[in-house]
Amino acid sequence: MKVLITGFDPFNNSTINPSAEAIKLLPDFLGNVEVIKKIIPTVFNKSFDILKEHIENNKPDIVICVGQAGGRSKVTIERVAINIDDAPIKDNDGNIPVDKKIVEDGETAYFSTLPIKAIVNKLNIDSIPADISNSAGTFVCNHIMYQSLHYAKVKNHSFKTGFIHIPYIPEQTVDMKNVASMELNIIVDALEKAILVCTEYFNKDDIYLVAGKDA
Ligand code: PCA
């Protein structure tokens, strides 16, 4: 099996994006699973133009996009991507779309096609803080997740795809007060485990796990 996994370059005047740092540390193979690693720009549309090229060139079975969710304390597996760009800050090309549909006539939302509950379960069993997230925001991470799911759907591609948000790493939070972070080696470990769960569940339904939220 082939897994394409992406991280984003640093954005919003930061010099680090832990998603890029983590991707770089992943091995090229996990057992017999080939892991193709790419860094994509934190830019609306351009990020997906590049992801699309990688998908077409590599024909992966699974596409996992990873990004930073500064302030979150856990690895969060995104459930849903919505058809809206509503940028709170400029992307790396200076774009700041407001209330703009990602795909004019696209679905309102797509659910991840990754086994999100099985991933959360595996990480928690292995003592890595993880949870389902029900919003990937309205910036570039939600955008790439929506575009990837939409592309798989309209092109009738069989690849499974979804998004994982990761916390800051400690060096990003030294000057911040009470902001969560996670060691890079734990994030890398979490991503390796997530990749393996995705391959294991490729032809299986996700597990039953209570992980919903009441608000
Ligand atoms: N996080 C941003 C975009 C790039 C990244 O790593 C987001 O959550 O939208």
Image (cartoon, rainbow, N blue to C red):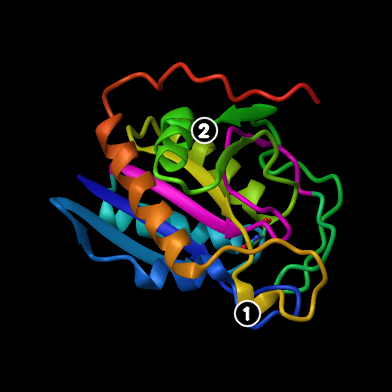
Residue assigned mark 1: 171
**Residue positioned 51% across, 33% down in the render:** 112
Q: Is residue 162 placed above or below 74 in the rendered structure?
A: above
Residue type marked 1: Glu
Q: Magenta stretch: residue 65 in it?
A: yes
Give the magenta-colored segment's residue range: 61-85
Residue 204 badge: none
Residue type marked 2: Ser
**Residue positioned 78% across, 81% down in the render:** 175
Q: Quadrant of residue 22?
A: bottom left
Question: Seen in the image, is 46 located left or right of residue 59?
Answer: right
Q: Position of residue 32 (x, y in %)?
A: 13, 50
Q: Is residue 8 visible?
A: no
Q: Are marks 2 and 1 in contact (CB under 8 Å)?
A: no
Frontmost of labels 2 and 1 is 1
17 or 4, nearer to the observer: 17
Q: Give the CA separation, mark 2 to mark 1.
A: 31 Å
Q: Is residue 35 placed above or below 95 in the rendered structure?
A: above
Residue assigned mark 2: 112
Assign the N terminus to one quadrant of the image.
top left
Any atom of ligand 1 within 8 Å of the CB at mark 1?
no
Q: Position of residue 151 (x, y in %)?
A: 48, 39
Secondary element under disc 2, as helix, strand or loop, is: loop
Question: Seen in the image, is 58 located left or right of residue 110?
Answer: left
Q: Quadrant of residue 121?
A: top left
